Image (tube, grey):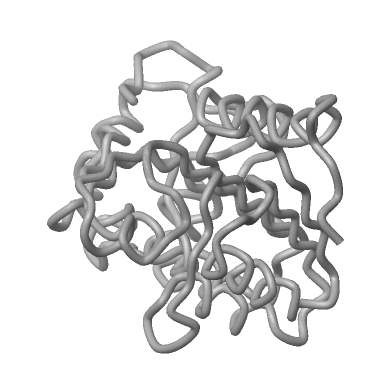
Amino acid sequence: MTLQPGRPDLVLVAVKLSSYPPVDAVTGFGKATAGRRNLSGISTFAGLRKAAETCNFRDNALKAAIGGFACHMSITIITDGVLSAFADLIQANSRRLYRVWLIAPWIGSADSGSDPVFRIVQALNGTPCRLIVVTRPPVAVWHLRAIQSLRRHSNHEVFGSAALHSKLYIVECNGFRAAIFGSPNLTPAADEQNQELAVEFRSSRSGRDDPTSAVISELLSYASTLRTHDDVVPLE
């Protein structure tokens, strides 16, 4: 995203360095590492200060960004370890999660180690977070076992949709939201072997206060209405 002079609807964004990994220790934005390309448009604090000289910001966001890093907005293309990136988000924010969405036709798990499903279940353990899963009705044993692993979290809903082809993963926290959508199913192969492509959106704002937050809100709306489709049934 590009900050434009005189646009009060575009908000300067930054983040506490310990809050939302992966975060670059120099810029405060998601790292542009192998498999991750950050598209937020600001790469250095010098860039923040330069933007401050030419842009108008609402809600005293500029002061907060340079002084306390109160808000954050980023868009990142991920081509490697997409599901691990999502598991990272859940683990880093486990204490303030209130809802997680897992929407994928196929879900599989190695049920140990660095497996994304295993890490998600471990991170949610003991939290009141609501876990909502939408997948195809399982036929394969490995698919059923992965769903059973997710059901270990007591506060869950699992839905089946035979027509599902969407892949969407959303984290909702107090003061932070993130969404990833793209090609990967929630399987070890998608995370480690396949050539996958996904886009990650992060924002510390709710509603539609900025373009990134607006996209996340649209994705949440899609996820919520997906459960009301005629072919979607509970898999409890």
Whether 48 is drawn above or below 145: the answer is above
Q: Nearer the viewer, residue 85 or 177?
A: 85
In this rendering, the count of numbered labels is 0
- Pinpoint residue 180: horizontal percent, then vertical percent: 47, 44
Q: Is residue 108 above or below residue 134?
A: below
Instruction: Report whether 148 appears left or right of 53.
Output: right
Location of residue 144 by image quarter: bottom right
- Left or right? Give the position of 7 relative to 128: left
Residue 228, given in percent of the width and then of the height, sits at 86, 30
Q: Along the line of sight, which residue is nearer the eye, 110 or 215?
A: 110
Q: Residue at x 20, y 46 (%)?
A: 195
Of the 4 image quadrants, the one containing the N terminus is top left
For the point 26% across and 32% down, the residue is 41
Q: Which is more toward the observer, 221 or 134?
A: 134
Decide if residue 226 is on the left or right side of residue 192: right
Residue that appears at 83% across and 74% down: 128
Give the vertical position of 154 relative to 235 (above or below).
below
